Every structure is written in C-alpha cells, then in structure tokens.
Amino acid sequence: MAIILTFLGKGGTGRTTVAIAAAKRLASEGKRVLLAGQDTSPAFGLLLGASVGPDPQEIAANLKAVQLETAVLLERSWEQLKKLEAQYVRTPFFKEVYGQELGVLPGMDEALALNAIREYDASGEYDAIVYDGSSDRATLRMLGMPEILTWYWRRFRGVFSGSELGKALSPFVQPVTSAVFNVGWTTEEIGGQPARDANDLLERGQAAVADPNRVLAYLVTSAEESAIASSRYLWGSAQTVGLTVGGVILNRSSSVAALGDRFDPLTVTPFPTRQGNDWEPLIDALPNFAQGSRAPRPVEIDVASGQVRLFLPSFDKKQVKLTQYGPEVTIEAGDQRRNVFLPPQLKGKPVKGAKFQNGYLIVSF
Amino acid sequence: MAIILTFLGKGGTGRTTVAIAAAKRLASEGKRVLLAGQDTSPAFGLLLGASVGPDPQEIAANLKAVQLETAVLLERSWEQLKKLEAQYVRTPFFKEVYGQELGVLPGMDEALALNAIREYDASGEYDAIVYDGSSDRATLRMLGMPEILTWYWRRFRGVFSGSELGKALSPFVQPVTSAVFNVGWTTEEIGGQPARDANDLLERGQAAVADPNRVLAYLVTSAEESAIASSRYLWGSAQTVGLTVGGVILNRSSSVAALGDRFDPLTVTPFPTRQGNDWEPLIDALPNFAQGSRAPRPVEIDVASGQVRLFLPSFDKKQVKLTQYGPEVTIEAGDQRRNVFLPPQLKGKPVKGAKFQNGYLIVSF
C-alpha cells in the first residue's frame, strides 16, 4: 500500500512544481515513487525535464513518472469491460464496439484516473504516489467519488426495491436477467457478484480517502489575496469530501507572517521560487509529509455524547447547509455535498442542534 | 441567440482576468452580457470586485455575473427530472429522493454547466455569454459533450438493436415499458419522445459548438515556454472537440515577437498586466471578437475531391491517431477523440491515404 499525496491550490501558484519536488524528495528518501500527472500537454514534461507517456517510465533512481491519458485509459478499461461482459452475459454485445472509437465524456477523466491510481497502488510497486491533478475541483470530485457512488447505490437501491416501480418490474427481473446473463437474479440481488465486487472496491476507496496515512492533501498558495482565499476555500471543500489536509506550502515567499492565522492549526511551510533546474533548495524546503496525518480529521463521531463534529474551516454558518431530508444527514459546503453515514446508535435520530465552534460544525442528536 | 465566448490557457496566465475584461468590453459596446464563472471560491468575486452567487446579478450596466454552483444546479435539475418522470412514468420513484441529498459526481459539473449556459442562451436575455471554466480540460470536455453523447447514442443503439442481446430482450420491452411507463414502446423506439427531444437538444448543441458565430474560444498565454506549449496543445485539442479558436491573447507582455510563428495564422494580441482596479487599459487592449470567426475551422469536408481536412495545428503525425474500426472515421489527438460524421457520399468508404500539410491532416477517401 502506497501513500497517495496530492496538492491543491489556485492555478499559477506552482502546484505542479511542488508535486515534482515532493516526488523527488520521497524518492531521495529511498521510497519507490510514482509521479502521476493529469496534464497531458507538453508543459508537464517541460517542467519535469523528462519525456513522459501513458506508461510509467523511470526518470531517476526510485522515481517513475506517468501522464494519465484518458483516451488510452478508456481503451484499456473497455477491454476489461468486454472481458467482464463475456463472463456474465450470454450474448455479449459490447464486443461490437471498439475502444478506439469511444469519445471521452465529462467525468471519465476522474473515474479512469482514480481507477489507474488504484491499480498502481495495488501493484505493490510503489511506496508513494504523488498525484498532480488538472484542477482542484476535478481532484476533489475524483476523491469524493467512492463515497458518493456508494451512497447513490445504497439510496437508489433501497428506494427502488421498496417502490411500486420495483414491484411492477419484479416479475420481469428473473426472465430478463436469465435471458441476458448466465445467471438469473431476483430484484433483491440485481447485479449479484459483480455489483458486490464493485461495492467492495468503492468501500475500500472510501476507507483509503478517509485515512490520512493513505491519502493526504497539502494546500499550495502564494501570498496573493486571491490565492489565499482560494486555498482556504479548498481547505474547507476537502473536508466535505472526507480528505485530510496536512499543511500549507507558501510558494514564492518566505513571509509566513503574511498568512496570519488564516490556516490555523495547520503548519505553513515557506517554499522558494524555482531557479532554473536546481531542485535541491525546493526539495529541502518541503515539510515532513509523515506529520501531515496529525492535522484535524474531517469527521469525528462521538456516540457517547451524541455528537458529530465536522471540521469545516474557512466556512461560516451561512456557507454551510445541513439537512436531514433523507435517511442520512447531509452537509453541503464549498459546492460539495456529503451524506454522513451515522453509526447505528445515532441513525434515524433527528438533529437536535448544530453550532459552529473553532472551525468545527458540531451536530447534536 | 447569444455568442458564447471562452478562454483557454494554462493556470496562472490570467484566463479569468481576460474573461472579466472581455465581459466588460462587450457590455460597454451595448451588448447584454452574462459572465458565467465555474470557480465557486471567493477568488472569482475578489477579482471581479463584486459579490456573485448562483443566480445572475447585475454588477454594471448591461453586465450580469453568475457563479455556476453545481450543487445548486443539481438540485434544480433533479426537480425537472422529477416532473419528467411524473409525466411519463406510471409510478414515479425518483420523487422519493430529495435533490438536497444528492452528492456531486465527476462529470456533473460539466453537464450541468452546459445545460445552464444553454438555458441562459435560450432565455433571450443575453447577446453574449462569457464562460470562465475551472480548467481547460473541463471546458473542452464540456463543449465536446453534445457531439460525443450523440455518437454514443447512435452507435450503441445500432449495435443493441442488431444484437442477439437486443433480440433476446425484445419480447420483454413492450410488457416492461407498459408496466413502467404511461406508454408502451418497442425495441425500435426505446425512450420514444423524451429520447427524441434529448437528441434534438444534443444536435442543436453540436451545431452551436461547430459554429464560430455561436461559440468561440481564445487562447491566453504568457511569454513563458511552458505556457506557450500548453496553449499550442489546447489549440490543437480544441479542434478535436470541433471548437474554433479565434486568436491568441498574450498576457503580461508586449513582445509579440517572442511567440514567433508558433500560432500562425492566428492573430496575437498583447495584453497589459492589470494595475489595481483600472480595467480600462485591459478592455482597450482586447481584440475585436467579431473577427475571431475568420480563423480556420476544425473540419472541412470536400465531397467532390473526396477529402476531409482536419485542422490540427501544434500536433505532428506521431501525435495524431486516425482509425476506421467502426462505421465512422475516428481521430485522436490531445487526449480527445472524435468520430467524424461523414456525408453519405463518403460514408463507408475506406480511407485511401492521410497526410499532414500546413497544419491540416488531409484524409482522402
């Protein structure tokens, strides 16, 4: 299992430079590192000083780099899907369509990148994977995906099987699935084994994102006001996704004081401007990533006191929406929405109150 | 109908600043302008010098601004979907799920933003919509969506109805759809009216993106090598999406000569560094957007000579893949893939040859 490290910050703050320095640093510590970039333009290779392609290539001792090309990943995933189809479906029809024809739709970048990272992680070939996303929004959506997909599956499955629609369809489920699949399924177990496998995968992904020893983000900012505002917003948004932010890297400035207490309680690390191809001062300036996992966690559940504490720094009460329409408590902030899965002791209980305190939204049941 | 204008360029080159200046410029010419930003962080409002929210607000004469918040758009679209469900489905079940619970999955940002822009355009309230995306990749995926979705629908529908699977399922289609929907459909017309409506919408979207008098992009770059490389890559990638690039804006530099002939035949316009809140020099420096539509179009089809000319500047032969696996010719470049829909005279004919000439890939049938 590798630690997956990523960097969030406004465009132009030097996110990719920091990611490259971090990969070099971890490799110099003897870790086997994969630097995975989502930018498929030549800019990534120019900055890295090496040519990169859709398969990991060694660019230095312990350090490999890969450019995650969605068109390539889509083609490979399509082949896997066809194999799965051949296994379960009596008369496969996806086989008529070639991976080389498939256009890239929105969302595929994130889904396929996440899957690629999962596979690199599972390969056991890396101790650390440094992911350089194409935008903060896309990175957060990507990391939020396992949890949100699990929720959609759980919620819609429940609604469907209890609904009139589910009942109206249920006489057809067995004959349809046995006509199509090698096995016959009932409404209760639509999808059967493949669905269970997919769900396991999502739950493992969800657990990884929630564990700062597995997935950890750092903020990158310059001393400019709009970059600081962006980073603070990303800090809060990351919590809504369930992602721990380990610290702040202040690029092109040594005046940590300029940030004041705006990122408390995180540690702010000054990072020098890059001078040509001399990466040493940058590598030396980086914080110790192993300490990042000490930062506040997004959610703390205290069953005894009937409290859920959500770390939501940078937002005020007006910017956070808390609702309890469905069976779970939903929290909305930073254009992210999350359903907090409650332990059995709190589940189904109505929310008694909510208050903001020291950057935490404390919800009482 | 509004002209939709967007800007592509590496993070930090000042894309948002240029977009704001462009919106101000068009408003000063008497056009009714909507500036739509995908960035939901406070940075957008800070740069704009106005507070912006999820509904258009007037920030100056003729100028409104809106922040496209996906969580809000998702809630609204969910209500529309429920109405559609109530209209067609006998026993609606989506009504059990609340829009406020729904998490945001990858791809929803682009799909919902495109839909929002379509609605603002259709409202007739605007002469120009300036779209400031959260990343170039996301903007290109968004604008490529109508064409690619149409392709998926056409291709999979054809494969499905001709397949063993389609035949195995066809006895169930009528009883299942009549149990679920208010109308009974056969395999040939799965989805019926709503599917036809959706397809019309996609085809109109596709036509708009292909028309530089409706949708037009400009590149934004600084004089830095990695920014230039990025912009050139985006220039080529935009063509693969079917989007015309009208010109180049060189930010924070007046030395147009530094770019050499790397963007020929586009016009390069120097753009000054922003000084505080004085937008006038920026507004004055912008090119005349009405002339952007004279730039090379992504595809030219010449039936008489049996040629398809694809404008693919910035790529060389090695970076472009041309395949003819399926019923159409597929072109892949810049991590985008496009199926070129051929006129009846060329359709089904094998590709005889392909060559690169003056930035064009010329395919002969």
Image (cartoon, coloured by chain):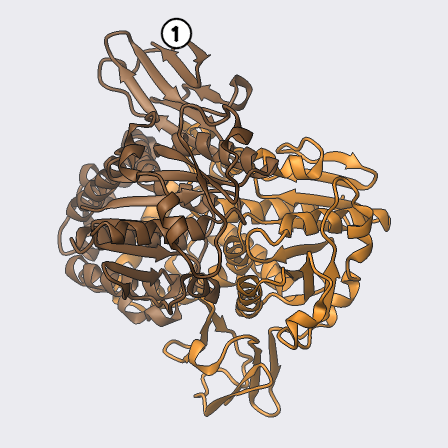
Chain colours: A brown, B orange
Quadrant housing residue A279: bottom left
Residue A43 position in % (x across, y down):
48, 63
In the image, is residue A148 above or below residue B258?
Answer: above
Quadrant housing residue A249: top left
User: Label 1 lies in what chain?
Assistant: A
Residue B280 position in % (x across, y down):
82, 47
Residue nearest the observer in this picture, A237 or A192: A237
**Residue ID for mark 1:** A352
Residue positioned 56% across, 90% down in the render:
B306
Residue A208 position in % (x across, y down):
25, 38
Residue positioned 58% across, 61% down in the render:
B203
Q: Which amino acid type is marked by label 1?
A: Lys
Residue positioned 47% across, 91% down in the render:
B353
Residue nearest the observer in this picture, A324 or A234: A234
Q: Can residue B35 be seen here? A: yes
Q: Can residue A114 be seen here? A: no
Q: Residues within 10 Å of mark 1 (few under 14, many from 20)?
A: few
Residue positioned 71% across, 66% down in the render:
B255
Number of labelled discs? 1
In the image, is residue B244 above or below residue B309?
Answer: above
Residue A288 position in % (x across, y down):
30, 38
Q: What element carries label 1?
A: loop
Left or right for A346, reference A20:
left
Q: Residue furthest left?
A: A183
